[in-house]
Image: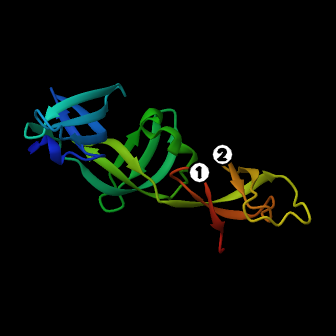
Amino acid sequence: MVKVIASSVRKGNVLDVDGKLYVVLTAQNFHPGKGTPVTQVDMRRISDGVKVSERYRTTEQVERAFVEDTEHTFLYEDGEGFHFMNPQSYDQLVMSTDDIGDLKAYLQEGMTCILSVHEGLAIAIELPRHVTLEIVETEPVVKGQTASSSYKPAVLSNGVRTLVPPHISAGVRVVIATEDGSYVERAKD
């Protein structure tokens, strides 16, 4: 564990509070005109997902947990969870569906992800920024509909709904942002 001052805590840091691990969702520093400056930290307990909000004096010490970010390859999903392998050591880690959340729709076999590992347990995942998926279903192209700002709904091969430009039809492969599921561009392959 490393002790740091509260004002240096940032989003994504993992803190050890009373022996439990928390991932920081937001951290804001407040400097009132009168009184002590404080840091407001919103965090989620890793063990059960409970959200907590804490306030620290900016000079107060908090314990930051040591988390190692390493590349892992997604192998498969089964009843136990999502299985990942470290390509250097061939060690395998399992993450639960709750830990992965909405990102599970974008996981593809063989995909390289960044796992945050603490004491041998995977506690967070970061996917590549973009994935290539196929359009399964969309409305047909309407002739004369050339306004660039008009998008139409489409269903991707992973079941997620998104908006695509009017010229995209079913069967076309597109690049999608994993952060929000939005259309980026037509795939180059």
Residue type highlighted by circle 1: Gly
Q: Report the residue marked by disc 1.
A: 181
> Does the CB distance between marks 1 and 2 fall below 8 Å?
yes
Residue type highlighted by circle 2: Val
Where does the image place residue 89, in percent across and percent down from the top left?
Answer: 29, 58
**Number of callouts:** 2
Quadrant of the rendered image containing residue 26: top left
Q: Report the residue marked by disc 2.
A: 160
Q: Residue reaching furthest bottom?
A: 188
Going from N to C along the chain, the mark reached first, 1 or 2, is 2
Quarter of the figure that contains the N terminus: top left
Viewer-proximal residue among 170 and 62:
62
Where does the image place residue 13, in percent across and percent down from the top left?
Answer: 25, 45
Judge from the rendering whether residue 154 lies leftward or rightward of residue 23; answer left or right.
right
Residue at horizontal 14 percent and vertical 41 percent from the top: 6
Quarter of the figure that contains the C terminus: bottom right
Where does the image place residue 51, in percent across and percent down from the top left?
Answer: 34, 27
Helix, strand or loop at label 2? It is: loop
Dot 1 surroundings within 10 Å: few (below 14), some, or many (20 or more)?
A: some
Judge from the rendering whether residue 170 lies leftward or rightward of residue 24; answer left or right.
right
Residue at horizontal 23 percent and vertical 47 percent from the top: 67
Residue at horizontal 47 percent and vertical 59 percent from the top: 128
Is residue 151 placed above or below 12 in the rendered structure?
Answer: below
Viewer-proximal residue among 161 and 66:
161
Q: Gap in Å between the C-alphas at discs 1 and 2?
A: 8 Å
Where does the image place residue 149, in percent across and percent down from the top left?
Answer: 72, 61
Residue at horizontal 36 percent and vertical 48 percent from the top: 92
